[in-house]
Amino acid sequence: MKNDELHARAAQGDAVANLQLAKRLLRGRGETRNYEQAVQYLDAAARAGSADALYQLAKCYLKGIGCLKDPVGGVSCLEQAAALGHATAALKLGACFENGTGAPASSELAAYWYRKAAALGAAEAAREALTRLSRA
């Protein structure tokens, strides 16, 4: 999709266009790298219901990329993305609970989210995480 068309669709609230623009801005491909603007596009796509945008936004919050570091906000975005069926978000959420990032450490909640990730399609990674968790 051409940049002008992508920007026009994003301005109209198109979640896919907002997500594509955000990814281009994060990577510096097709757009000049701009993390702050990428977060704005991710937020717009997330508000429009994009699970992948919620996951990408969570990563920004967890690392402080293009925004203030906000682990609690990151966990909230991961929960929303996982609720929409995003397997990698559920896996990352398990790691947050395992490590106490943005939420109190809880092996029970970590295991819950790892099992949820497996059910959503990230079976191998979830199995590895559950094995690691059981050894802790």
Image (tube, helix red, strand yellow):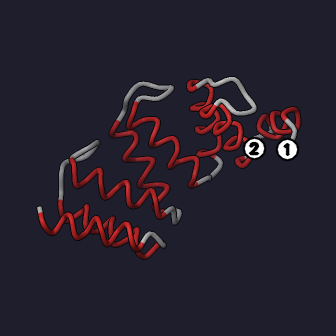
Please provide percent x and percent y for residue 102. Answer: 29, 42
Which of the labelled discs sits on residue 17, or is there none? 2
Please provide percent x and percent y for residue 86. Answer: 51, 61
The mark that comes first in sequence, 1 or 2, is 1
Please provide percent x and percent y for residue 34. Answer: 61, 23
The amino acid beneath tag 2 is Ala
Q: Is residue 10 above or below residue 106?
A: above
Q: Can you name the residue that lies furthest to the left here?
A: 136
Residue at image point 38% right, 37% down: 62
Residue at image point 19% right, 64% down: 133
Q: Nearer the viewer, mark 1 or mark 2?
A: 1
Please provide percent x and percent y for residue 9. Answer: 82, 40
Q: How many marks?
A: 2
The amino acid beneath tag 1 is Met
Which is more toward the observer, 61 or 31? 31
Question: In the shown orientation, is residue 99 left or right of residue 20?
Answer: left
Question: In the shown orientation, is residue 131 left or right of residue 26?
Answer: left
> Split into 4 quadrants, where in the image is the C terminus?
bottom left
Q: Quadrant of residue 89?
A: bottom left
SS at badge 2? helix
Residue at image point 41% right, 55% down: 79
Residue at image point 40% right, 68% down: 117
Q: Quadrant of residue 110?
A: bottom left
SS at badge 1? loop
Which of the labelled discs sits on residue 1, or is there none? 1
